[in-house]
């Protein structure tokens, strides 16, 4: 029974636990007036405590509100916090993909979705756990938060850590995970900085080489 799942949309009748009256699904018992739920949705047949829920017709399910704090993004196909309206990267039907961290559903989850700068979604709790281990989106490797402050710290560390003489003229081709551009930069053991967007979220895209004019 632990794996049993109820399709709430197909619920037609409920039975009152107090008077045992079988009746159409509704918020109050028609026989003894028992309250079945502080919140009741006649579409989802969701009975719950009052958590400022609202039914989103576009999502097709009930969301935890309050409603005025959220908007429905038709491209992402998900209700998002108002502060993200016009301020996030849309990906078609991204909410229909599972969370890449826990591999569980995002669209119907009661856990708030977190939108990464790249547009991919994670459960908020999964996002917080991910930041304990790294800073990249697990799907596209784009930085999952504003890293500019850390990049400046890394600039200082690189400047204070000169490479041995045999590596000082060495360059390497890199691919930036943030701007998706390629560039050729000086090799450094602490990190290679993108010449275009100045991110250190880069990957080596070719072998190291010594500049011929500096040999």
Image (cartoon, rainbow, N blue to C red):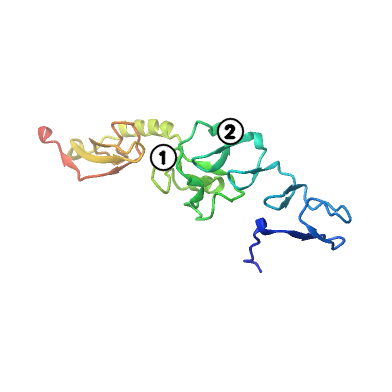
Mark 1 or mark 2: which is in front? 2
Crowd tier of the residue under label 1, counting other residues whose Cα lies within 10 Å: few below 14, some 14–19, many 20 or above: many
What is the secondary structure assignment of the residue under circle 2? helix
Crowd tier of the residue under label 2, counting other residues whose Cα lies within 10 Å: few below 14, some 14–19, many 20 or above: some
Which disc number belongs to residue 37?
none
Residue 131 visible to the viewer: no
Residue 149 visible to the viewer: yes
Q: Residue beneath label 2, please?
A: 82
In x, y percent, where is residue 141?
38, 45
Distance from Cα at disc 1 to Cα at disc 2: 23 Å
Q: Nearer the viewer, residue 210 or 157?
A: 210
What is the secondary structure assignment of the residue under circle 1? loop
Q: Nearer the viewer, residue 111 or 128?
A: 111
Q: Residue beneath label 1, please?
A: 143
Count of labels in the image: 2
Please state if 134 lies on the left or on the right of 2 as rendered: left
Going from the N terminus, do you reach mark 1 or mark 2 first?
Answer: 2
Label pair 1/2, CB-CB below 8 angstroms: no
Q: Nearer the viewer, residue 152 or 127?
A: 127
In x, y percent, where is residue 190?
32, 40
Q: Residue at x 53, y 42 (%)?
A: 114
Q: Residue at x 84, y 61 (%)?
A: 21
In x, y percent, where is residue 150?
42, 34
Please state if 20 lies on the left or on the right of 130 as rendered: right
Placement of 78 over or under 198, stated as above or below: below
In x, y percent, where is residue 80?
56, 39
Q: Quadrant of the C terminus?
A: top left
Q: Quadrant of residue 68?
A: top right
């Amino acid at each position: 029974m632990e794996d049993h799942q109820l399709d709430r949309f197909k619920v037609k009748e409920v039975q009152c636990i107090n008077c045992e009256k079988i009746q159409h699904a509704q918020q109050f018992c028609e026989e003894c007036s028992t309250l079945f739920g502080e919140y009741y949705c006649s579409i989802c047949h969701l009975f719950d405590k009052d958590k400022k829920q609202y039914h989103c017709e576009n999502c097709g399910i009930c969301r935890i509100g309050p409603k005025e704090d959220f908007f429905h993004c038709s491209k992402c196909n998900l209700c998002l916090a108002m502060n993200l309206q016009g301020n996030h990267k849309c990906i078609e039907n991204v909410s229909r993909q599972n969370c890449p961290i826990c591999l569980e559903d995002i669209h119907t989850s009661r856990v708030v979705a977190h939108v990464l700068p790249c547009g991919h979604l994670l459960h908020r709790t999964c996002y917080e756990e991910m930041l304990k281990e790294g800073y990249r989106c697990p799907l596209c490797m784009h930085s999952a938060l504003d890293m500019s402050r850390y990049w400046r710290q890394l600039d200082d560390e690189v400047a204070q850590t000169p490479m041995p003489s045999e590596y000082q003229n060495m360059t390497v081709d890199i691919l930036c995970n943030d701007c998706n551009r390629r560039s050729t930069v000086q090799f450094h053991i602490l990190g290679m900085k993108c010449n275009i967007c100045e991110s250190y979220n880069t990957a080596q895209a070719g072998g190291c080489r010594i500049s011929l004019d500096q040999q």
